[in-house]
Image: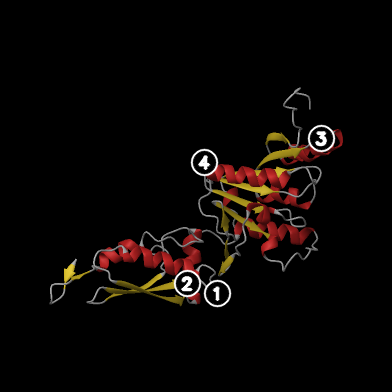
Amino acid sequence: MATDTYGTAVPAEDAVREALATVNDPEIHRPITDLGMVKSVDIGADGVVAVTVYLTVSGCPMRDTITRTVTDAVARVEGVTRVDVTLDVMGDEQRRELAAALRGGTAEREVPFAQPGSLTRVYAVASGKGGVGKSSVTVNLAAAMAADGLKVGVVDADIYGHSVPRMLGADGKPTQVENMIMPPSAHGVKVISIGMFTPGNAPVVWRGPMLHRALQQFLADVYWGDLDVLLLDLPPGTGDIAISVAQLVPNAEILVVTTPQQAAAEVAERAGSIAVQTHQKIVGVVENMSGLPCPHCDEM
């Protein structure tokens, strides 16, 4: 720390930048210094520090969070008397450089989870019938894994019957940086759903090719970071999405959800049998809503 002509301590720029390195972008979850988001740092003789931070897009929903975390981090540096944060917006070239850095130089349309070196376990949660609790199982698994310290993402691949954002409590909106989408998080889980892009409760009326394109975009264009686990909440049955998952993420393991009723179990068996045709592994079967033993007589 330096001093001015009156012997007053002036915060060092290195210390301020070290403090800024502890601030993570709330959507990308990496230090803003690594992402090239710190435009300038000016330190006055009176200890006032002015920091200008680049936002990825002008309408960034996390602008208040970034301002607050930067202010808090820099204010802890010795000698700082006040922090003034100014927000600017990245230009097109800066956004392209950021997107390239996040992708690590890989092709834009590449699904990272399908690559041989991927360390992410991908589980496709499937069912034969609707209403068996498939989305509930997906959401609870995701929250439990995140609570255990794993980095978890969820793709709501049930395009017609999307419900994961509401069940997970994810009310944020994705942010687009060039051709890359930053997913919102809830309970430590990153999540993406078509419901985040449709107005209100509007239905999605798409056919096969558009469903495949949407799933491909969720897998390739969303910036997931380094995930331990990715869960795919599939629609019921053995339709287009199940086939697309086998094509886009052939290493995905299948988790089948059913209820005890014979009709549900038979349909679930057909849903699981698609894994034989696509050469995917069935990792397990969840029998949901199996019943509640009576606490007095132990009968179901």
Type of residue at label 4?
A: Asp
- Answer with mark 1 or mark 4, whichever residue precedes in sequence: 1
Q: Quadrant of the C terminus?
A: top right
Type of residue at label 2?
A: Leu
Q: Which residue is mark 3?
A: 265
- Kindly report the distance in space between the C-alpha atoms of the residues bearing marks 1 and 4: 34 Å
Q: Which residue is mark 4?
A: 148
Q: Which residue is mark 1?
A: 59
Looking at the image, can residue 250 be seen?
A: no
State whether residue 107 is above or below residue 291. below
Give the structural element (helix, strand or loop) at label 2: strand
Answer with the quarter of the image where residue 259 lies. top right
- Kindly report the distance in space between the C-alpha atoms of the residues bearing marks 4 and 3: 31 Å
Type of residue at label 3?
A: Ala
Q: Which residue is mark 2?
A: 55
- Kindly report the distance in space between the C-alpha atoms of the residues bearing marks 2 and 1: 9 Å
On residue 280, the disc is: none
